[in-house]
Amino acid sequence: MMFRNKVQELLDAALAEREHLFLIDLNINDTNKISITLDGDSGVNLQDCIDVSRAIENSLDREEQDFSLEVASAGVSSPLKLVRQFKKNVGRTLKVKTISSEEIEAELTFADDEKIILEWQAREPKKIGKGKETVSKKLELPYNSIKEAVVIISF
């Protein structure tokens, strides 16, 4: 069995035991450095990373194949990649870049398997008279039109 396939199989088994966690990225380079990035429905804590790391490391033989292993959580500033990440961040503010190069900073109010809905307030010229007025905006955006989406952290 190829090394990458064995690692993937062990990772799948470890995640099957921890249904609240999901894989964001698995990377194995030429020197067998294994980098795993995880996310979770309610976040990822240090113990989650330790448990997944041990589940993989204890099942691989360093005598057979030398490797290094790094298991980490998706950083707070990491772009959202999976539908599951969008769903868990409903109610938070996102900065979204569309494939048409439009940038929108808005609240994620809905996410399903096909699309997201963003809502925000904008200042626009009044339809009648001078000055500006605040209007509510709403945009339905299919996932295939999102280039990048990042959660905006506010303190």
Image (tube, rainbow, N blue to C red):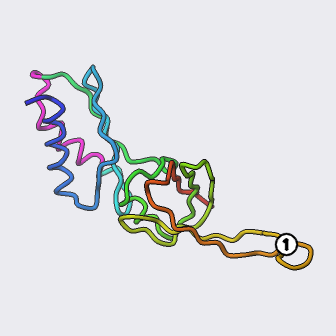
Where 140 sits versus 1, above or below? below
Q: Position of residue 37 (x, y in %)?
A: 34, 43
Q: Which residue is rendered at x = 46% and y = 61% of the image?
A: 142
Q: Which residue is rendered at x = 26% and y = 28% of the image?
A: 68
Quadrant hosting residue 3: top left
Quadrant hosting residue 84: bottom left
Q: Nearer the viewer, residue 133 or 71?
A: 133
Residue furthest to the left in view is 1
Residue furthest to the front in view is 128
- Left of 95 or right of it: where is 85? left
Residue 115 in magenta stretch: no
Q: Position of residue 14 (x, y in %)?
A: 18, 50
Q: What residue would you read off at disc 1? A: 132
- Left of 91 or right of it: where is 68? left
Q: For the N terminus, which image quadrant?
A: top left
SS at mark 1 in the image: strand
Q: Which residue is rendered at x = 49% and y = 53% of the image?
A: 146
The residue range painted magenta reads: 49-64
- Left of 11 or right of it: where is 130? right
Residue furthest to the right in view is 130
Q: For the C terminus, which image quadrant?
A: bottom right
Quadrant hosting residue 123: bottom right
Q: Position of residue 148 (x, y in %)?
A: 51, 49
- Left of 1 or right of it: where is 40? right
Q: Total number of numbered labels?
A: 1
Classify mark 1: residues with Cα within 10 Å, few (<14), some (14-19) or many (20+): few
Q: Nearer the viewer, residue 56 or 113?
A: 113
